[in-house]
Amino acid sequence: MTESFRPIALQPRRALHWVVGAALLAWAASAVAGAGAGLLNAMATLRGHQGPSDVAYGPLPRQRFDVYVPGTSIDAADKTTGSPLVIFIYGGSWSMGSRRDYRFAGEALAARGFTVMVVDYRLYPEVKYPDFLEDCARAVGYGLEHARELGADPHRVFLYGHSAGAYNVAMLALDPRWLRATGHSPDELAGWVGLAGPYNFLPIEDPGVKLVFDWPDTSPDTQPINHVGDLARPLPVFLGAAVHDKLVYPQQNSIPLKDRMTARGAPVTFRTYEHVNHALLVGALSWPLTGFAPVLDDTVAFMRAAAPVAAAPLAAAR
């Protein structure tokens, strides 16, 4: 990941927006980097979409998730069928983060009519690759099996990840062995969203990530890009990237993955965003940062278009 980018050049009419937002950027960067949710989550609490919390998908302390429900925000068509289910997996270099740091993401998506699971998983140094993938696969299996109990439609389940979480999501969606171990398959998913994901990051340069993946003994099999074509039916995917991301370079990761998937006939929606960085790409899900990039609007539109029709009435399936 050695590629560099030019400094951000703001149009004059955007400059005032950024000056006004400078203070927001300072605390939002820490909020989405796992250092504390701060004002993003304080404001998200006012939305009131929190559902069951600390739900176990496995026996270990970090095998837990929180639920956010649409409530009165649910679409009329979803009231009898169940809302789409989004399983949100956060980033943090596989070594930091907590589901409680991402309440803003759960609340934002629930306010758009989705049921959301924000998932914890084990991190380094407790575990290394591939243990965190096994945790995430187990959480997805739980979501598929218990979607009805959460008020959601098991035929409209999406994975949604940022940074290291986007890596986890991509591996589960592209490489069938992880969900197969839980008795499930990527074919059961409606699609996936990856924001600023590291999909093609060999050789590893970050010292911490080297430890997570046992570099230099890291197999090419660890790279999501090498699993394009593993599925007979490629899933719809939304790939989002910050143009000026200096942590996970789009030209090494998102763009090659997009190109390879498109060549294989996968339905890919690709968006780049000028006025956010790596962390603010996911921070833009929440007000007051939505004005920096339409990430929320774009990903919601993608998921609604990818699975527009519910499969069975909720009451009949229980």
Image (spheres, grey):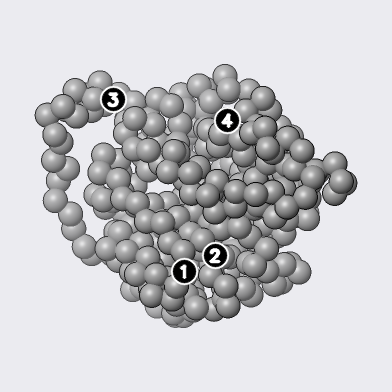
Do tag 4 and tag 3 residues touch (Cβ < 8 Å)? no
The kind of residue tagged 4 is Ala
The kind of residue tagged 2 is Leu
Mark 3: secondary structure: helix
Do tag 2 and tag 1 residues touch (Cβ < 8 Å)? yes
Query: Which corner quadrant of the image does residue 138 belong to?
Result: bottom right
Mark 1, mark 3: which one is toward the viewer? 1
Q: Which residue is mark 1?
A: 266
What residue do we see at 58% from left, 77% from top? 232
Q: Which residue is mark 2?
A: 235
> What's the distance in space between the residues labelled 2 and 1, CA to CA?
7 Å
What residue do we see at 30% from left, 59% from top? 250
The answer to whether 185 is drawn above or below residue 230 in the figure is above
Mark 1: secondary structure: loop
Q: Position of residue 253 (x, y in %)?
A: 35, 64
Q: Which residue is mark 3?
A: 21
Q: Earlier in the sequence, mark 4 or mark 3?
A: 3
Do tag 4 and tag 1 residues touch (Cβ < 8 Å)? no
Asked if residue 122 can be seen in this view, the reply is no
What residue do we see at 31% from left, 54% from top? 247
Q: Which mark is residue 37?
A: none
Query: Which corner quadrant of the image does residue 23 belong to?
Result: top left
Mark 4, mark 3: which one is toward the viewer? 4
The answer to whether 69 is drawn above or below residue 300 in the figure is above
Q: Earlier in the sequence, mark 4 or mark 2?
A: 4
**73 left or right of 194?**
right
Q: Which mark is residue 111?
A: 4
**Viewer-side residue, 259 vs 4:** 259
Q: Earlier in the sequence, mark 2 or mark 1?
A: 2
Mark 2, mark 3: which one is toward the viewer? 2
> What's the distance in space between the residues labelled 4 and 3, CA to CA?
23 Å
